[in-house]
Amino acid sequence: DREMQQRLWGLFELAPMGIGLFSVTSNRLLRANPTFENQFGRSVQSLDFFDQPLDVHGEPLANRPRVQETLREHARLSGLEGYFMTPGQELAPVMLHGLQLDDYGNEPVVWLITEDISERKKVDHLKNEFISTVSHELRTPLTSISGSLGLLANNAVGELPEKASKLAHIAYRNSQQLTFLINDLLDMEKLVAGKMPFRSEHHVLQNLVRESVENIATFAQQRDIHLQVAELPAVTVHVDRQRLNQAITNLLSNAIKFSPAGSSVDIFASQRRESVRLCIRDHGEGVAPHFREHIFKKFSQADSSDRRASGGTGLGLAITRELMAHMKGSVDYESVPGEGATFWLELPVAG
Ligand code: ADP
């Protein structure tokens, strides 16, 4: 009724988020609340404006879901992030939410909510800078501590009494763990800030896999895991050799870590036309279905007691996903709990 409608319009006027009402048929902005007007002024005439989100440097974001397409298909849109040019020619980070209503009065409309997320971006930035500074400051002394402990533990500077040797070993192992964590933190920070250089070139997949398998062979032996490499398709991929090695190593080390002693980890690949899928299968506990939405996030571990048992940081898969995105590939997995997991990398075939 009238009163209800009045109240709703009151909310619309006062809302701290921008709200724009667009006609679906004419694609025109029908009405905007004051917050929306403040954010975008007269620059927004139609929904097309929001179909061109930019990155932090003002370059068009590639591979982004399209606002209008998403609304057409799903009638709703939530949490799409991007930078948009304000009338004052500044780049503003905005989060978009939207809803398409098929009849509003007589015509279909789209409600678009625009949330100013510049504060959050500032805090994120500070947080990343902080992590980066702390990690850098920690790395140098840690390298020296770890190096010294390694020498002590391995009796390079004289035989230690048994008890002392045990303690030196524990200290050494833990200092190495800390080094892994700090290196992961620094990698993650670089990836997110776009500061990690990538040099994608043509490489033969078989060679890349052989390298990674050789690098991790000792770890597999220590855990009594048999690495079984199937015959791989003779295919050339377009990737950064070192970064891909890092991604494969992350998956292999997880597969080894989460496998029961005496079992095998299988490595195989299948080729499609434009991509090749490199698979790594283990016969461990697998991944619980509820963990799927967290597994690629930073610091996520299915069981936080894992951290001590298996010596991980919870950053490996988050880094792997970033690495793959930078190489125009992807990472995913499939798992039957109790029967193991198969993780794979989707790589772009060269040429
Ligand atoms: P980390 O291995 O350092 O803990 P990751 O990001 O590589 O961090 O993995 C995150 C979590 O995902 C692991 O702690 C584990 O719970 C789960 N996980 C990863 N790989 C496997 C696997 N092959 N089998 C079972 N669980 C896995």
Image: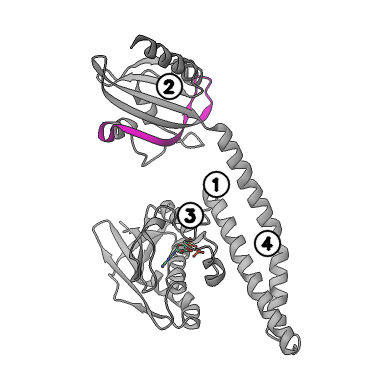
Identify the residue under disc 4: 139
Are dots 1 and 3 in contact, CB under 8 Å? Answer: no
- Dot 3 alpha-carbon crowd within 10 angstroms: few under 14, some 14 to 19, many 20 or more: some
Secondary structure category for the residue under label 2: strand
Q: Distance between the residues labelled 2 and 1?
A: 31 Å
28 inside magenta stretch: no
Q: Distance between the residues labelled 1 and 3?
A: 13 Å
Q: Earlier in the sequence, mark 2 or mark 3?
A: 2
Q: Earlier in the sequence, mark 1 or mark 3?
A: 1
Q: How far apart are marks 3 and 4 (CA)?
A: 23 Å
Type of amino acid at the residue the image marks with label 1: Ala
Identify the residue under disc 3: 198
Up the image or down, 43 lies above or below 77; here it is: above
| First to last magenta residue range | 72-92
Residue 93 placed where, x, y %? 50, 32
Type of amino acid at the residue the image marks with label 3: Phe
Q: Which disc, if any, is residue 266?
A: none
Type of amino acid at the residue the image marks with label 2: Ile
Are dots 2 and 4 in contact, CB under 8 Å? Answer: no
Identify the residue under disc 2: 19
Identify the residue under disc 1: 193
Up the image or down, 172 lies above or below 276; here it is: below
